Amino acid sequence: MIILGIETSCDETAAAVVEKNEDKINVLSNVVASSQDMHAKSGGIIPEVAAREQVKSVIPVIKQSLADANVSSEDLHAIAVTVGPGLIGSLLVGVETAKTLAMLWDKPIVPINHLHGHIYSCFVEHAPEFPALALIVSGGHTDFVYMKGHGEFEWLGGTRDDAAGEAFDKTARIIGLGYPGGPAISKASDKYLENNPNKKLDLFPRPMTDQDNLDMSFSGLKTSVNNYLKSSENKNTDEIAAEIEEAIIDTLIKKSSLAIKKYRPKSFLLAGGVSANKRLREKLDLALQSITESTKFYVSPLKYTGDNATMIATTGLYLFQPIDWKEVKATPSLHF
Ligand code: KG4
Ligand code: ZN
């Protein structure tokens, strides 16, 4: 089966053609256009600017994905499109484009939850065993999800306020690093740690890590960083970046360790934009190895950590529930 995936829930416009034979996923094309450079200038995403850019790029991106895959519309079995959660203007661009193409090409649509998509990025190159426990860490979400099987999602806990990526983005702005904040903080932190590999990084709090649940809170980090800047002589941005990164990573690792101990899954999946963070990938891997050998660690391939349509098409192939285009609706606050 071959599916065209479309993803426009935030500031990316992405299309991909993906094929599934038995349990093997074959990515025929993966095209992503981002308006991130424009948002870097404004220091964050302006929803209307994002949607206007997506209107311009959605058709060229889809055309490119079909050309790269060397397929035509006749070869497709369905169109998988992100219907939520996300920004309404952005979601509508992808959803309405998918509906138009579905009508013209006489194809069904597989509506996809963006968060399921992030989880399924771990199924593109591997076939993790169930039960699986997933940690999604993105700009809008930080959630633990338990999966007994394909399509069976049970939300276990997550952030009560800011998402981990949001914490990176907002604190990066406070210390004068650019947008998106995650990669900027990671780069500054690496620079600092190269020269100070043994520095103890415990400046900022790790809220809720003493609690026996999978809830987290990242919104206080902004205040902690602000207070530190006001009260301290230390203006070493790279060092503060390393402290911020460690506070976020440490919280995620402590809660992931607790999740593994409680649920003993066969697979632990890490996905979402923040999962691109090298230190998080490495430290989580070590932490999980020290807890158990019976849980295998899978992390999203780097090219599929951020928003992309390969993960959307892959979800569509695994959870194939096609519906008529007339029934498809963008749902900005869609839950698990
Ligand atoms: O999944 P994603 O591309 O979009 C959403 O669905 O939100 O995630 C974007 C988030 C941003 O907050 C960005 O700062 C963060 O992922 N991010 C990172 C890194 N690369 C991207 N955070 C930490 N370290 C990174 N290397
Ligand atoms: Zn995302």
Image: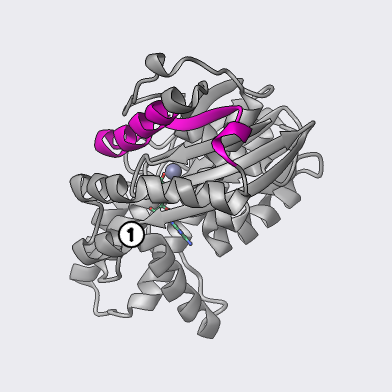
Q: Is 234 left, or right, of 307 in this rendering?
A: left
Residue underneath mark 1? 36
Q: Nearer the viewer, residue 21 or 168?
A: 21
What kind of residue is marked 1? Gln
Element marked by disc 1: helix
Query: Can you say which quadrant of the picture contains the N terminus?
Result: top right
Question: Nearest the camera: 142 or 201?
Answer: 142
Q: Tell me, yes or no, if residue 158 can be seen here.
A: yes
Image vertical order of residue 185 relative to residue 315, above or below: below
Q: How many labels does the image show?
A: 1
Image coordinates of residue 133 in percent, x first then y, are 63, 33
Q: Is mark 1 within 8 Å of ligand 1?
A: no
Taking the spot 28% from the left edge, 45% from the top edge, the residue there is 55
| Residue 130 drawn at (x, y percent) | 74, 28
> x, y percentage for residue 297?
71, 46
Q: Quadrant of ligand 2?
A: top left
User: Which stretch appears magenta?
Assistant: 72-101
